[in-house]
Amino acid sequence: MSVPASLRFPARLLLPALALGTAAAQAPRPPAATAPSLPPVEISALGDPVEKSYRRIVDGMDLFERRRAQAPQAILRFRLLPRRADTDMEDIELAIVGDSVRIPVPVAADRSFTLPRSPRALRENATVVPNRRARSMTWRVDIRTPGLPPDTRRLGDLRLECAVGMEAELVSESRSAFDRLARLIADRGYCERREPRYLFFADRPLWRVTLVHGERREDLSVDRLYAGVTRDPIGHAELRHCDCEVLIDRAYFAPLGDPGWPDDTLLTFEYIDDGEPPR
Amino acid sequence: MSGLRCASLALAGLLVAGCAGRAPPPSEPARTARSPLPVAWAAVTPGRSTRADVQAALGPAHVLRFGSGHEVWVYRHGGVEPGRRRRGDGPAEPHELVILSGPDGVVTRVRTRLAPVAAR
């Protein structure tokens, strides 16, 4: 579906995960005693918390089930990500909260979680809420086929992550209502475009990402790493709306819309700190 | 030769100190008739070359500076500028030289990427 001319924006304003130039690229570490993490209070009592629509996330879960064929062995989870360098990512409490329902959601040691299905929560238009303030953290779709080699992702899993992420609205913020409308129009088929700028995040700061399918190997261009900042610099204002805000060094784009790379293509990762002693 | 974009943004932990302009053209032909890469690129040696050495040999780069103290320097050769049309059979994308240096300013890793043949 093409965007009407009257609603066309510069590409970056439509991007679900903006390539925003620069950011605090170092993976955030929990600071010491002065960490501004919040006490484990009732989530409903937390002012201005991170909130996401439970209904939209369930829509994404439904889409995952409909498109199982693209990643037949994969498991759908969601993964927490920091949005600020000083965000404490330890001991996060998460819950589905409605008018009369509150369902705690366990978070695994790798900061991932699954969401149960609750008709009651859907009826109450519940939200998914952690005990962290708005814009301090977020979560993204995480779809992984088990049994892959270490430091490897499967392209079909990533394609499905994009589709589910867009459906669940687990993407970077839109800066205005007009942007949200434009995204709504542009969303259909977005992940199938030649160069969708849906950001993925590696586990550690990246050095190289290589596509592998059979005997064919090809490194991703550096312009597809680091949120594309070597090609499209980011301004401060845009960076604040990007899930990559403190994860630029781990962010990358994958060739989701390139039919020359099948779903079983593997992306192999090399990291900046490979070979370095642990800190 | 493709130009290099300049960006001068500094945010907490990461500085993209973009290039001052286009990278200088190679002063010598490729090492072999089949190599499309500038000979000068081969002079960068992990464990020995410093950032100053690289800049002296290759000119200004597109720089990403991470909060860890690591820096990624990017040089490009060939290809076309974004928004322009490819001429003849040349690659649309430029070839890339990517250099990683540690907090001590010494190059630790180098990689090149030959632009794939466009299958259009």
Image (cartoon, coloured by chain):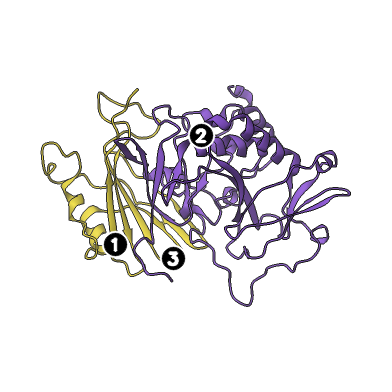
Is B87 placed left or right of A53 in the picture? left
In the rendered view, tell whether residue A33 sits above or below residue A233. Answer: below
In the rendered view, tell whether residue A50 sits above or below residue B29. Answer: below
Q: Tell me the shade of chain A.
A: purple
Quadrant where the C terminus of chain B lies?
A: top left
Quadrant where the N terminus of chain B lies?
A: top left
Q: Which numbered tag is attached to residue B81? A: none
The reply to whether residue A197 is visible in this rendering is no
The image shows residue A277 at horizontal and vertical percentages of: 37, 69
In the rendered structure, which amino acid carries the disc numbered 3?
Ser
How many angstroms separate mark 1 from mark 2 (CA)? 32 Å
Q: Which numbered tag is attached to residue B108? A: 1
User: Could you tell me which secondary element the residue under label 1 belongs to?
Assistant: strand
In the rendered view, tell whether residue A173 sits above or below residue A256. Answer: below
| Contact, mark 1 vs mark 2 (Cβ under 8 Å) | no
Q: Residues within 10 Å of mark 2 (few under 14, many from 20)?
A: many
Which chain does yellow denote in the image?
B
Q: Do labels 3 and 2 share a chain?
A: no
How many angstroms separate mark 3 from mark 1 (CA)? 14 Å
In the rendered structure, which amino acid carries the disc numbered 1?
Thr
How many angstroms separate mark 3 from mark 2 (CA)? 29 Å
Q: Which chain carries label 1?
A: B
